[in-house]
Image (cartoon, rainbow, N blue to C red):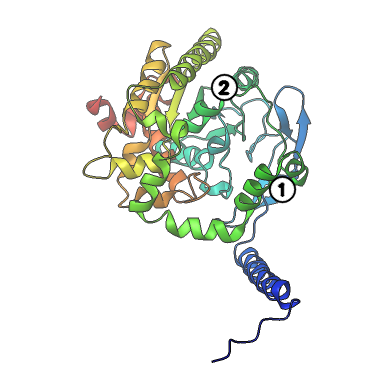
Amino acid sequence: MSSPPALPRRDLWLLPLISLLTVIATLAATEIFARAVWPEQSSDSCAIPDPYLGFRLKPNCSSVMKVAEGPWYTSQYNECGYRSPQPCGPVPAGTRRIALMGSSVAEGQHVPYQDTIAARLADDLTTQCKMPVEVQNLGSAAYLGTRLIGRMKEALALDPDAVLLIVTPWDIETELSAEPPKIAGPADQAAFGGQQKQLSMLIKESRTVTIMEHYLFRNRSFYVPAYLHYGDKADYLRPPFTPAWQTRLRRYDELIGQLSDMAHAAGVPLMLSFVPAPATMVMMTEPHPPPGVDPYVFIQAINGIAARHGAEFVDTSPALREHGQPERLYYQVDGHLSGLGQPIAAQSIAEGMMAGPFPAFAKCRANTLPHLDAAR
């Protein structure tokens, strides 16, 4: 029996090349389709360089943006560059003003303004207090660490009745970085050197991968183990805290001490409001958390920091946890609270302000929500 004829020499490299090109063409077509179905515009055209903050938002500017998992929305900034519809000048007679600080969650990143914590907090307090309440939103992505000291000076210059600082685990995790935040844009991608980093960025920026992760992360049995494999990023859930997280919390304690001293010197009450990560919410609603994990230990640490420096504290997780699947209140891949979750967090904060020792909202506590006093 004769053996089959050998392939021509040319086919030894031509056939694998055709297969490779077919795979590349298929992946490219899939990526083009994914970007058409889930478009994204993450760069804020209103961002301008700032020597201290890294970037600042241009006054009287508007920018249209979208995260892949969310809707198109417009960010509009007032004459101070804050994401607020009200002017940042003198407080109108009869109006109560709150200065909101923090990073991207405080800003309401990826969420239409009417669904942000700032907008809903103002609406809730205005309705409950039966008087105008406005929120000047000084929050923006990467406003962390010592940058908040400069932001506090701006907040106190607004003559607010209260300063509200939104806190997330990500804020404290990343505040050790000494690098100033950069304006997100195509130029940032060129800054990554090395083939490994370029490949990592390529995968991270792939819309196809984003869509796959979005649906994979909806499966709790996949999402929780995947999140806990982040190592240091997830170690805030594991008591006792690692040396890295102890350092982060110590530095955050020092920062809150400085911010609190500034607020108290100006006679303005300070409130910290904790917004958990989606993985924390998943573990809070599970009958038994994974071994070695405590979804409440980090919240207790932040509460302790607030108490040491005379700041009020509101944990939004109980309100978020009331949702049957609280992780659905977030963008699954991006991790920010969505337009479904931010209003719930805002309501929790509004109740905390009306229940707390805030002179500006004492009338609300006495006349509209007396049950809050009884619950304290």
Numbered badge on residue 176: 2
* Residue carrying label 1: 63
Location of the C terminus (image quadrant): top left
For label 1, count other residues whose C-alpha is less than 10 Å away and answer few (under 14), some (14-19) or many (20+). some
- Answer whether residue 94 is visible to the viewer in this image: no
Tell me, for residue 299, which label it has, or none.
none
Q: Amino acid at mark 2?
A: Leu
Q: Residue at x 66, y 34 (%)?
A: 82
Which quarter shows the N terminus?
bottom right
**Which residue is more in the foreground, 17 or 23?**
17
Q: Position of residue 280 (x, y in %)?
A: 37, 39
Q: Nearer the viewer, residue 239 or 321?
A: 239
Instruction: Please tell me which residue is depicted at 72% across the width and 32% down the height of the picture.
Output: 56
Pick whichever, 18 or 179, lies toward us. 18
Instruction: Give residue 274's position: percent from left, percent from top.
Output: 42, 30
Q: Earlier in the sequence, mark 1 or mark 2?
A: 1
- Residue 189, by quadrant, is top right
Residue 58, placed above or below residue 376: below
Is residue 183 in view from this perspective? yes
| Side of 347 where 110 appears, left or right | right
**Residue density around tag 2, few if under 14, some if 14–19, many if 20 or more, within 10 Å:** some
Residue at 69% across, 39% down: 77
Q: Which kind of residue does numbered mark 1 sit on?
A: Ser
Residue extending farthest to the front is: 1
Q: Secondary structure at mark 2?
A: loop
Foreground tag (1 vs 2): 2
Residue 328 in picture, x, y percent from top left? 40, 52
Taking the view exactly as shown, the residue that stands out farthest to the bottom is 1
- Could you say whether the residue bearing mark 1 is in a helix, strand or loop? strand
Q: Position of residue 229 (x, y in %)?
A: 42, 40
